[in-house]
Image: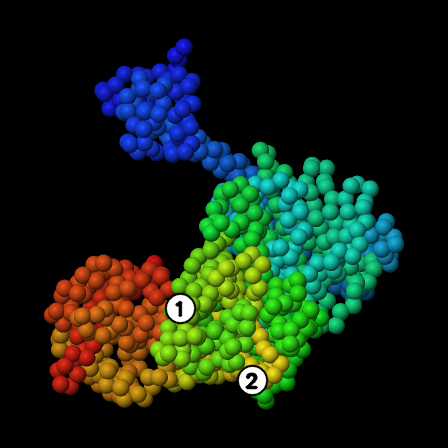
Amino acid sequence: MAFSMHKEPLNSKQIDSSKYVRYTPEQVEALERVYNECPKPSSLRRQQLIRECPILSNIEPKQIKVWFQNRRCREKQRNEASRLQTVNRKLTAMNKLLMEENDRLQKQVSHLVYENGYMKKQLQTASATTTENNSCESVVVSGQQQQQQNPTPRHLQRDANNPAGLLTIAEETLAEFLSKATGTAVDWVQVIGMKPGPDSIGIVAVSSNCSGVAARACGIVSLEPTKVVQILKDRPSWFRDCRCVDVLSIIPTANGGTIELVYMQTYAPTTLAAARDFWTLRYTTSLEDGSLVVCEKSLTSSTGGPTGPPTSCFVRAEMLPSGFLIRPCEGGGSIIHIVDHVDLDIWSVPEVLRPLYESSKILAQKMTIAALRHIRQISQETNGEIKYGGGRQPAVLRTFSQRLCRAFNDAVNGFVDDGWSLMGSDGVEDVTIMINSSSGKFIGSQYNASMVPSFGGGVLCAKASMLLQNVPPALLVRFLREHRSEWADYGVDTYSAACLKPNPYTVPCARTSGFPSSQVILPLAQTVEHEEFLEVVRLEGHAFTPEDVALAQDMYLLQLCSGIDENAVGACAQLIFAPIDESFADNAPLLPSGFRVIPLDPKTVLVDGPGATRTLDLASALEVGPGSDHLSSDCEPNNYNLRSVLTIAFHFTFENHLRDDVVSMARQYVRSVVGSVQRVAVAIAPSRVSSGLEPKTLHGSPEALTLVYWICRSYRIHTGGELLRTDSQLAGDALLKQLWHHTDAIMCCSSKTNASPVLTFANQAGLDMLETTLVALQDIRLDKILDEAGRKILCSEIMQQGFGHLPGGICVSSMGRRVSYEQAIAWKVVDEDATNHCLALIFINWSFV
């Protein structure tokens, strides 16, 4: 019996070309089977379908095509309806969250108004007091009243053998945590850029005035509360600075909760300060409304409770009431409130590093936002919203990222209980060398026992920390990632990769010059908000002599890059990499090296602090111009002044009989990397802060002075105007400085017509626009940065006629960023004999898009 299975609207072509078709259940079932395999079959496939299914023989091919069109349309509508329902649920939950936040702010305003009125009343009372006796009596009475209203809390000595005493501490911790998460116990200031919405990470705020540093975040995820609690309690899985968490005691409570005594160790972010540890009580319970709470607080002499484990190489920090509040959402999912509040004992670190330990924004990025991002990442992976290539599960890729970070943190800290010991220096304290000959320490860890030779050897780490000025961390790390040849030595890469071979010590030492190589970056995975990338880097080796063939081979690195978003507040940027073999097994051994750049809070930065002697100050290694003194000492408060701490660490394996040679090579190599990074930092620093810095390679160079003279003279010949406003009155170094500091980007390239022009020179603005250095400039071809219109004009007019204008357009920097410019002028530069020397270009009013 035939009947209509669907009533999708027919378009005009259907109405004109055919009649309405009724499908039987068998026909619909046959069409659905094909649709599940191929939603958009070709004409041949539809004809084949009619031949293979006799039950469809009475339907015209055009009608089959219409059925598939309508079926795809219904599928799209269902998906869109489901997406809109999900967005609506998120918006409803976010609206509820915002209403609660508004209510909290209203209470905070009321509290401030009350305090303001009370202070005014006190001032009026104090001014009305005329006699000393009355004044003293008033003070005594008010003091007694205040003592009665706020009696000094008494804490009994409580230990693990007294669960009732620990429960009292737990209940106090719960009340104090909830007052921070949803109340007015802390004055929260919302972080700029964290706007609420269905696709945002949530609402993030930091403390404005409280003891220690504190951060808070509120967000929505599509996971059940119990799953969220399980994930967040596993702190090492999302907190990259967490070394270990040991639960030493678990005590169940009568209300179905648990009290845990927890000892946690965290890594130090740099080599210049000691690591921190925490001894806390963690309380997990549920509230009357069905919400789950995990709150935590340090156990100290003032709070009572048992004494924590003693430590030698850690500084005991204090965790003030912190934790997670997870509330179920209507329709599924959870609303999460996260509070982190710690006192990191800033007086135990050098003054130059104290901003890292007293910045609530840095705490928010490292802990609070990291927890929310991790939950959101797992939520989207669980719901199938994220697809990964290469056949690897998301959990495996996360494990690789965690192992890279953990091993790099181990290298930076060099804990004694991991087997690390400090080697003596060579008289200069800039590079620290640590040795680990305990093969048992590597088994079962992020390393691999095969890396340490059974006949005697180990792993060494060469590391250094330095202070950078006026260099955005995101920009520096992005440059180091894109331009590996600027700082890396191919010979050292070969030596590092040799630890993966069965006979790893065929390369006894790296060559000083290395071999040229190019890198190919293969994306592997990235987090939801693209703040972290996991990728494989292929280093392509090239040999120029027969004896170099054995060394000139492709090598592979597993690389983690994070924090390259310049708009992220308080984020640290890092580039960590480790050699891997082509098999890239899930349990591949990792021996990572890399860079970490942490911004210091500009509000508490001094140009020359007492602790600056502990670092390698970049500015001291620069050759500065006459205006440098003004830049360093007379800066106005509003001037751009960004400082950051760069930490470098490199791993090497060694045999015992070659240990001294490898140590010498590692120390020399890290020093060369430090020098390269300093040169890069000068090159990519914004023009407004580096205008007083002169490049050593140009200052006083006859070739540079001659080139600048030819550029200006040729411009005058072609245009009749002056490139530099006062170049007729300048000569020598003054002319060079005028061109170097020109606000528009000026650059030169080869003028060969049978090959793509290669850039040979650029002024400071040109290097800023291309995001490169003078050394790496020769690797950039002009046709790679111009758009299609610019390339056509360059080939058809400028190369032929020797002069031309490029209309405003878009070009691309060496890092792939789009740059707009209003106009560009190109002209051929001729020497004294009127022979074509190069092609010069000036990009007017350029800016990053």
Kind of element beneath mark 2: helix
Q: Position of residue 435 (x, y in %)?
A: 63, 77
**Measured along the vertical axis of the image, is residue 2 above or below residue 268?**
above
Q: Is residue 584 left or right of residue 338?
A: left
Q: Is residue 828 left or right of residue 534?
A: left
Q: Does any portion of residue 134 appear in the rendered image?
A: no
Q: Residue at x 53, y 50 (%)?
A: 394
Q: Which labelled disc corresponds to residue 244? A: none
Determine whether label 2 and label 1 are within 8 Å by CB.
no
Q: Position of residue 754 (x, y in %)?
A: 18, 70
Q: Which labelled disc corresponds to residue 661? A: 2
Kind of element beneath mark 1: strand
Q: Is residue 591 left or right of residue 512?
A: right
Query: Amino acid under label 2?
Result: Asp
Q: Are there few (<14), some (14-19), or many (20+) residues within 10 Å of tag 2?
A: some
Quadrant assignment, res 774? bottom left
Q: Where does the N terminus fall, quadrant-wise?
A: top left
Query: Amino acid under label 1?
Result: Glu
Q: Where does the C terminus fall, quadrant-wise?
A: bottom left
Q: Residue furthest top?
A: 1
Q: Is residue 663 left or right of residue 176?
A: left
Residue under label 1, please give it: 540
Q: Residue at x 44, y 33 (%)?
A: 79
**Measured along the vertical axis of the image, is residue 537 above or below residue 183?**
below
Q: Nearer the viewer, residue 138 or 269?
A: 269
Q: Are there few (<14), some (14-19), or many (20+) residues within 10 Å of tag 1?
A: some
Q: Nearer the viewer, residue 341 or 549?
A: 549
